[in-house]
Image: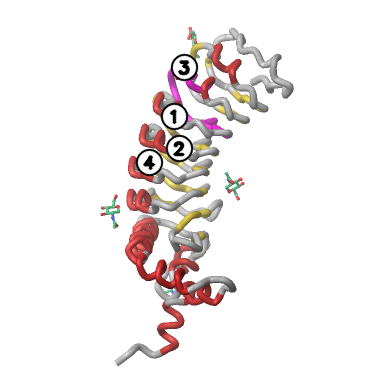
Amino acid sequence: MSPPFHSFHLHKLCYAFMILLPGVTILTATAIRTNNGGNETDRLALLAFKEKITNDPQGVLRLWNDSLNFCDWNGVQYGRRHRRVTTIDLESRGIASTLSPYLGNLSFLRVFNLSNIFQGEIPLELGRLFRLEILDLNGNNFEGKIPSTLSRYSELTFLSVANNNLVEKIPDELSSLSKLTNFQIHVNKFTGGIPSFIGNLTLLETMSAAYNHLVGSIPDAFGQLRNIMAIGLGGNNLSARHRYDASSSSTPAAGS
Ligand SMILES: *[C@@H]1O[C@H](CO)[C@@H](O)[C@H](O)[C@H]1NC(C)=O
Ligand SMILES: *[C@@H]1O[C@H](CO)[C@@H](O)[C@H](O)[C@H]1NC(C)=O
Ligand SMILES: *[C@@H]1O[C@H](CO)[C@@H](O)[C@H](O)[C@H]1NC(C)=O
Ligand SMILES: *[C@@H]1O[C@H](CO)[C@@H](O)[C@H](O)[C@H]1NC(C)=O
Ligand SMILES: *[C@@H]1O[C@H](CO)[C@@H](O)[C@H](O)[C@H]1NC(C)=O
């Protein structure tokens, strides 16, 4: 017996929507069928993410259930072509949780914005999200260090782990984030010096590392940051030797 039409329709709600879009041909339907594996991986990853939640005062994730296709879950956006999760944006919902390593399976994720009450360590598996362009973990309670696996983000333009409880050195591996324009690590407990590789991230427009436990001097290599508009380094124990030269840039660099 074939399933009643309405249940098919509900279950395939978002696929049906795509098929009805003007200009979408039968090719899309074929692509949809062959992509079911990826789809299920994303669904499992989102459910694993939800499973870790210990407090959800606004009930945001209560709506993440099978009564809706997961492409319509709150805070989740989808790529039309691959039907894979491209965005998770769950800012300021007061959600308390730890990050599931399953998130590393959302291999089409481009934007991850999470300002809530997440704690524990940033899982190494997050480094598998090689398509990420924006990672905004600002304002949680993350502990431990920045995993060196975050260096695999060749498309990353925005990285913020500001306002957490992260420790240890800024990892040298981050020198590979060559597309980075915004780098925010302020208000943590980072130690060690400011690495000179930051001078090689020449697309940087803002860099804030204020209110950590950083020591030493500002690397001369900062003079290579031609696009920099703002640097914040106050609230550390940096020596007064300001030798970086922003005078060749038309936009003045803001001091710390
Ligand atoms: C499941 O989600 C729907 C909305 O998508 C919501 O109306 C319903 O209350 C949820 N079910 C449970 C058991 O929370
Ligand atoms: C997803 O990630 C988890 C944890 O990293 C792993 O155990 C699991 O096998 C992965 N694959 C799928 C298809 O869920
Ligand atoms: C993340 O969300 C917050 C709150 O809506 C917003 O202020 C912030 O700009 C977003 N981050 C990025 C990188 O877009
Ligand atoms: C900066 O880039 C130059 C040229 O690619 C390279 O030789 C140097 O080792 C890099 N410096 C750091 C600190 O990564
Ligand atoms: C700051 O650094 C200087 C020299 O590196 C050191 O002598 C001093 O004790 C440090 N101060 C604090 C508060 O850590």
Nearest the viewer among 3 and 24 is: 24
Inspect the image, locate mark 4, and give the three-letter code of the amino acid beneath it: Gly
Marks 4 and 2: which is nearer the front? 2
Q: Mark 4 points at which residue?
A: 127
Q: Callout 4: 10 Å neighbours few (<14), some, many (20+)?
A: some
Q: Which of marks 4 and 2 is nearer the N terminus?
A: 4
Label 2 amino acid? Ser
User: Which comes before the other along the chain, label 3 or label 4?
Assistant: 4
At which x and y percent is residue 215?
49, 15
Q: How far apart are the two marked residues, 2 and 3, measured between alpha carbons?
A: 24 Å
Q: Please give the residue where the numbered disc 3 appears in the rendered image.
A: 193
Q: Mark 3 or mark 4, which is nearer to you?
A: 4
Label 3 and label 4: CA atoms lie apart by 24 Å
- Residue 149: mark in rendering: none
For the residues bearing labels 2 and 1, Cβ distance under 8 angstroms: yes
Residue holding disc 1: 176
Identified by mark 3, the residue type is: Gly
| Residue 235 x, y percent position in the rendering | 57, 22
